[in-house]
Amino acid sequence: MGWREKLNQHGGLVTLGAVAVAGIAVLVVWLTLFGGPAAEPAQAYFTSDDGQTYFTGAYHRFPPFEHEGGEAVRAYLFTCDGGENQFVGYLQKYTPEARQALEAAEASESRTFTDVLEELPLRAMLVKRPGDGRWVPRGTPEAERVRRVGCPDGSRARVVLIR
C-alpha cells in the first residue's frame, strides 16, 4: 500500500494533524509579532555610592532603602557601545510619602504595587545624575534633561536592561 492510500484511509487524522500544525504556526507568529504577556523584570540595578558602583536587587524595592550601611537608590545603566561598557546615567528614588504608599500597598491584599504606582504623580519620583547634589521631581523639564543620557559622540545612550 502506497502513502496515498494510507492518507486516504486515515483522512481524519491527517486533517487533525494539519490543523494542529497550522494552529501552532499561528500562535508562534502571534507571539513573535505581539509578544506574550508583558512581564515585569524581577531585578533592577541599584547603587549606594552615587553611581560609582551598582548592584542588582529585587525590582519591587522602594528606594531609598538601607543597603550595607548606606542609602541605596535605583540606578539606570546605559551603554554607548552595544553593552561592552556600561555606566550609571541617572539615579531615582521615591519621595517619603510615595515610598510609604508603596509599602502600604505591598502589605495590603486589596491594592498592588502597580495600582499605587499608576496613581502616584510623576513628582513622587525624584531623579538626579551621579555627582549632582540636587534631586529633581520627575515630570519637570529639568528631570527630562537628567533622563536624557548621551554618548560622547552626541548620540543617545541606550538603556541596559537586566535579562
Image (spheres, rainbow, N blue to C red):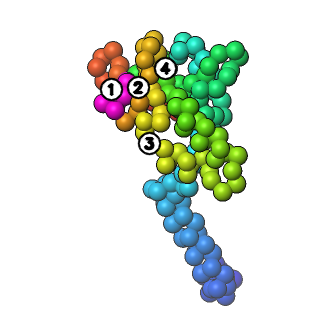
Q: Is residue 82 visible?
A: no
Asked if the residues shown at circle 4 and circle 3 are in contact, with their CB atoms under 8 angstroms apart, the answer is: no
Residue at 33%, 26% in the rendered image: 142
Indicate the position of residue 69 as horizontal and vertical percent values: 69, 15
Which circle's residue, 2 or 1, is located before the other in the chain? Answer: 2
- Tell me: residue 154, above or below residue 137: above
Give the mark toward the camera: 1 or 4.
Answer: 1
Q: Can residue 88 be seen in this view?
A: yes
Residue indicated by mark 4? 88
What crowding class fits label 4: few (fewer than 14 Cα within 10 Å), some (14-19), or many (20 or more)? many
- Tell me: residue 119, above or below residue 2: above
Q: Amino acid under label 2? A: Val
Residue at 47%, 33% in the rendered image: 125
Residue indicated by mark 2? 136
Question: Where are the magenta residues, as a range?
Answer: 140-149
Label 4: element kind? strand
Q: Amino acid under label 1? A: Glu
- Dividing the picture into quadrants, the one containing residue 14 is bottom right
Residue indicated by mark 1? 142
